[in-house]
Image: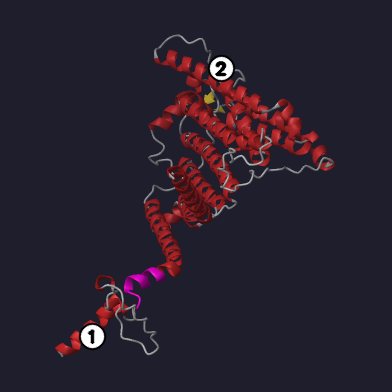
Amino acid sequence: MLEKLLLNHYEAAAVILSGIGLTNLLLQRNLIKKIIGLNIMDTAVYLFLAAKGYVEGRAAPILIENASGGWVTSSAVYVNPVPAGLVLTGIVVSVSVTAFALALTLKLYESYGTLNIDEALLKMTQEQEEIEARIDEAEEEVLS
Amino acid sequence: MNEELRRIWQQFYDWVVGNGPRPENEVVPEEPPPDLPFAQKPKDKYSRFHEATLKERYNQWLEIHGLHLFSVLYSGLSVLTCLVIVSLLLATVAELPPFGDERNPAHNEVIRRYVEHGGHETGAQNIVAGLILDYRAFDTFGESAVLFTAAVSVLMLLGASRRNSLKDDPSPHSDGEGWDFLNRGPPALRHHVFRQDDAILRGVATLSIPVIIMMGCVVVINGHLSPGGGFSGGAILSTALILAANAYGFERVHSFFNERTFIVSSSTALMIYALSKGYSFFTGANHIHSIIPKGTVGDILSGGLILPLNICVGLIVAGTLYGFYALFSEGDM
């Protein structure tokens, strides 16, 4: 099994990187670090896709001119072009998600003064209780 | 034997329920006042020494150690989950076909079709550009739309706080009717500190910004001939904008690239993309003659719609990435 893993060492590295990212996502309490964990997982996916598209000894998928002025269109010359397109999609989605998550984190920090998810949740609960107490008081005032 | 068992069971029962044996230093509770009517007299059972029941002790223990226990359990379980997932995936990776082998099932007839017919069907020398902007152009349209949507939502989230804090009202959460008990101050303004006299940064920026813009344009315009395209070229163009903002201040960039410019240019680019590609797909799918020429492979004006689409995508990406930078550092575009 280890030999096979060494044979596919790019894919193995991608899987380990994805595990590191997932652990980061689960264990970090700081939201920025959680987002970094998500980005590590994204990177692992790009590495995996790029490794799947590679073929030993072939050129990048940009048509090469042959000796008579035409184009070499044999599929035995170029590497797989589809993973490049897929990685492009992945990068764009990852950038968008990261930016949106960071904006939400910034708003959370502005409201609660902390990036720690536990502290923020505690403050949210306290705030909710405070609001409910205020509503009860107001209701009692109205009733009396 | 039986007596002994019963005694032990009684002890255990007392321990659980909380009727333990009377300790030496027990404070005897005061006798109830004798003039109470019979029904209101406290029951005799509970006037004894009341040891905490198992449930109470459990709750007490949980209050002290519960959070710690939970975090330990959570960390252990999450590490375990990750290890299980990674080992399962590694076992799968070990069964994958060897890396870089040309007989891998991933290199199938779809790839052969794209490589062998991509050149004369799309007119693009760069097969990846032909793939993402011709065969799968609606996928790329969706990507641009995702990027634009992300930029607009970040603009909504971060631009609003800026506009609120610029008003006279110091606390945006109070509406003047006593609902300001949330006690959140005004949102922290993100001030970008500029050293206006930074001669080195300005000199380098003056020299390099034209080169960066030229490089970005080359990458965008040659997207169908060489590596690159709208996404990478747009990223290069956005670095020129970010460098300009850092060297000359956001106000200078704001004078020619602001929120309005961004919204107008990105929406226009997306509309042009949608309309032109919609036309191309409509004619192509219905075998109608299309007015878009393919051109000869390798020329700068070739590849049909790929060049204009690359320019549209480049505009969106440049605006979006600069917008992210400006919004996160300044809170405004």
Residue interval drawn in magenta? B51-61
Q: Which mark is residue A14?
A: none
Is tag 1's residue or tag 2's residue first in the polypeptide sequence? Answer: 1
Amino acid identity at mark 2: Thr
Label 1, residues with CA under 10 Å away: few <14, some 14-19, many ≥20: few
Q: Which residue is mark 1?
A: B8
The C terminus of chain A lies in quadrant: top left
Give x and y (percent) for residue B123: 53, 20
The foreground one among B291 and B85 is B85
Residue at 47% from the left image edge and 36% from the top image edge: A86
In the image, residue B109 above or below residue B170: above
In percent of the image, x 26 and y 83: which residue is there? B11
Report the residue that reaches farthest toward the front: B35
Residue B222 in sight here: no
Say if the magenta span includes residue B59.
yes
Is residue B151 visible from the viewing direction of this image? yes
> Which amino acid lies under the numbered mark 1 shown in the image of this protein?
Ile
Label 2 lies in what chain?
A: B
- x 63%, y 24%: residue: B221
Please name whichever residue, A81 or B290, is drawn nearer the observer in this view of the structure: B290
| Chain identifier of the residue bearing label 1 in the image | B
Closest to the observer, B236 or B179: B179
Q: Which residue is mark 2?
A: B296
Q: Secondary structure at mark 1?
A: helix
Q: Residue at x 68, y 39 (%)?
A: B330
Q: At which x and y percent is residue B72?
A: 44, 65
Relative height, residue B51 to residue B320 (above, below): below
Q: How far across and down, in percent of the image, does residue B324 sit?
A: 62, 37
Q: Main secondary structure of the magenta part?
A: helix
Marks 1/2: CA–CA distance: 98 Å
Is residue B170 within the magenta segment? Answer: no
Judged left or right of residue B290, residue B151 is right
